[in-house]
Amino acid sequence: MKARSDCSICYALDIFGDKWTLLILRDMIFEGKSSFSEFRNSEEKIASNILTDRLKTLDAEGFLIKTASAANKAKFLYSLTDKAIDLLPVFVEIFAWGAKHNAIKQPANPVYKKLVANKSKTITEYANELKMIRNMALGS
């Protein structure tokens, strides 16, 4: 992706400035989703063409590792890179902001609740767990 400027915020917006990219990463980080069909079944109902585009972008920008499924070579699975896992503190802050200002529903995810209780310790522990899950999925 060609950078529009040297600005860090501009770079982040070029990656995350749509309404789907962070939701895909949310599903991977907090729901353990790893396949196209799992992403399509998310509550928000992303269109297939948009999902394909966002997955390509996340792969090209180094947030995901795309591999063929061992069970079905025609099916691809996506794993988080360290670059994606480094977003965990960002998600915690977005969750906290959303929980504070969203009167409709509070986050029910148990990981989020642990993160709120002890951010720095839980972020470190959960990031290590995500890396372990990725390494097992990739056989490394």
Image: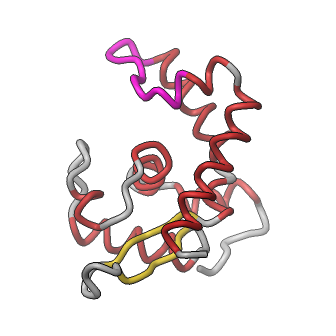
Image quadrant in which you'd find residue 20: bottom left
Span highlighted in magenta in the image: 102-113
Q: Is residue 137 above or below residue 28?
A: below
Image quadrant in which you'd find residue 70: bottom left
Instruction: Pick out the residue farthest to the bottom.
Output: 73
Task: Name the spot of residue 38 as percent of width and height, x first.
Answer: 26, 58
Of residue 49 and residue 14, the one placed in the foreground of this image is 49
Of residue 51 and residue 41, the one placed in the foreground of this image is 41
Residue 77 is covered by the magenta coloring: no
- How many circles with numbers are drawn on the protein? 0
Instruction: Pick out the residue farthest to the top.
Output: 103
Q: Which quadrant would the N terminus be assigned to in this image?
A: bottom right
Image coloring type: secondary structure
Q: Please name the residue shown 76% across and 61% down the image.
A: 7
Task: Name the spot of residue 27 as percent of width and height, x first.
Answer: 40, 49
- Magenta stretch, main secondary structure class: loop
Q: Please name the residue shown 61% across and 74% down the image.
A: 62
Q: Is residue 17 above or below residue 5?
A: above
Q: Which quadrant would the C terminus be assigned to in this image?
A: bottom right
Task: Name the spot of residue 74 as percent of width and height, x first.
Answer: 25, 86
**Is residue 27 toward the left or the right of residue 86 in the image?**
left
Of residue 101 and residue 81, the one placed in the foreground of this image is 81
Of residue 128 and residue 2, the one placed in the foreground of this image is 128
Q: Please name the residue shown 38% across and 12% down the image.
A: 103
Task: Name the spot of residue 47 as percent of width and height, x first.
Answer: 21, 62
Q: Is residue 4 above or below residue 38?
A: below
Q: Please name the residue shown 75% across and 58% down the image.
A: 8
**Is residue 132 toward the left or the right of residue 98 in the image?**
right
